[in-house]
Amino acid sequence: MHFLDQAKIYVRSGSGGPGAVSFRREKFIEFGGPDGGDGGKGGDIVFEAVPGLNTLIDFRYTQHFRAKRGTGGSGSNRTGAAAPDLVIKVPVGTQLLADDEDRSLIADLTVEGQRVVLLEGGMGGRGNASYKSSTNRAPRQHQPGIEGEEMWIWLRLKLLADVGLVGLPNAGKSTFLNAVTNASAKVGDYPFTTLRPQLGVVRHKGREFVLADIPGLIEGAAEGAGIGDRFLGHVERTEVLLHLVDAAGDDPVEAWRVVRGELESYGADLAGKPEVVGLSRSDLVTEERLHELKRELEDATGQTAFPISAPLGEGVAPLLDAVIQRLGAQAEVREDATADERPWSPL
């Protein structure tokens, strides 16, 4: 299945049904009078977050959504039937954005089963029975029903994950994802092997968490270099960032600084998230060089650097222990926060 995290669609709610103009025609009733019923309400446009979806690819092929119109009223004071709501199912984590210059946020569907009524259907028109009065005994007025609303909107998907995997291209992120989860991400010896975000579930020492891998960042990604930073939105909701640095690279410390600079340029408080640093592909350097790199990276980051070799499974357990510890610390922060201060979390 192809991955798509942005789509522009057109939505229109249903118009109300027209009111009826009708008069009673019964054999033994001399003055029947008006009996036209009101029209039915038009269908609403409703968005619902459902499980089992992780892409917006369906909206590439279907871009126009129109709810049905309400049924018109009829004689004998019969009100027309209301049209059913048009429910548009989207993945959990989908944002609804206005089609304006700022792409202002309309709704954020972060909980399974969450529903948002975006556009309400038009009310049904009045039938001529409702116009009857002592001075207007045979009215022929009626209303055609209120028109539905319409608009263009953007859908943007931000995957829900607990831990975000970041680093330069060819830092071993996909290899690590495959080693610790049930994912089967593409691995290659060339930059930008990963072209779309990947998700996997890590099970470690009785704990589970969702790990998200995004395409590698290079210097200038915030200005569009490489694949750019558009996929960083998929780690905005994460609690912890797992930063992999290639131990076999030319300058691992500078590589760490480059990615940190792009996180700061992107904003959304990504640079302020708790970070765990891993020295990937540590089996490709000598023991002496590895100790030197570990010390330099710890001096630069101010925290422990974990040497790992994902294909061999070396150093992976201590790294996952640190990630789970950070997740636990974040959970305690959420428990202590007040209802107004407590941040959103997928946990």
Image (cartoon, helix red, strand yellow):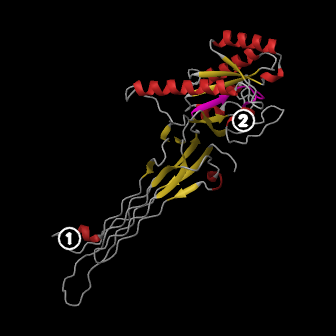
Q: Is residue 107 found left or right of 278 in the rendered image? A: left
Amino acid at the residue labelled 2: Ala
Q: Secondary structure at mark 2?
A: helix
Magenta stretch contains residue 172 = yes
- Residue 83 in percent (x, y) is at 42, 64
* Residues packed near mark 1 inside 10 Å, few (<14), some (14 to 19) or many (20 plus): few
**Residue 267's spot in the image, x, y percent?**
58, 24
Residue closer to the observer: 109 or 183: 183
Determine the residue located farthest toward the front in the rendered image: 205
The amino acid on which the numbered mark 1 sits, given as a three-letter code, is Asn
Q: Secondary structure at mark 1?
A: loop
Q: Quadrant of residue 268?
A: top right
- Horizontal side of 149 relative to 268 (left or right) equals left
The magenta-colored residue range is 162-173
| Residue 306 higher or lower than 121, as above or below | above
- Total count of labels: 2
Residue 238 picture location, percent across and down: 56, 31
Asked whether 13 or 280 is in front, the reply is 280
| Residue 256 vs residue 328, the one in the foreground | 328
Was residue 248 drawn as part of the magenta stretch in this picture?
no
130 vs 242: above or below: below
- Residue that carries the numbered disc 2 in the rendered image: 179
**Circle 1 is placed at which residue position?**
136
N-term-proximal mark, 1 vs 2 = 1
Q: Residue furthest bottom?
A: 27
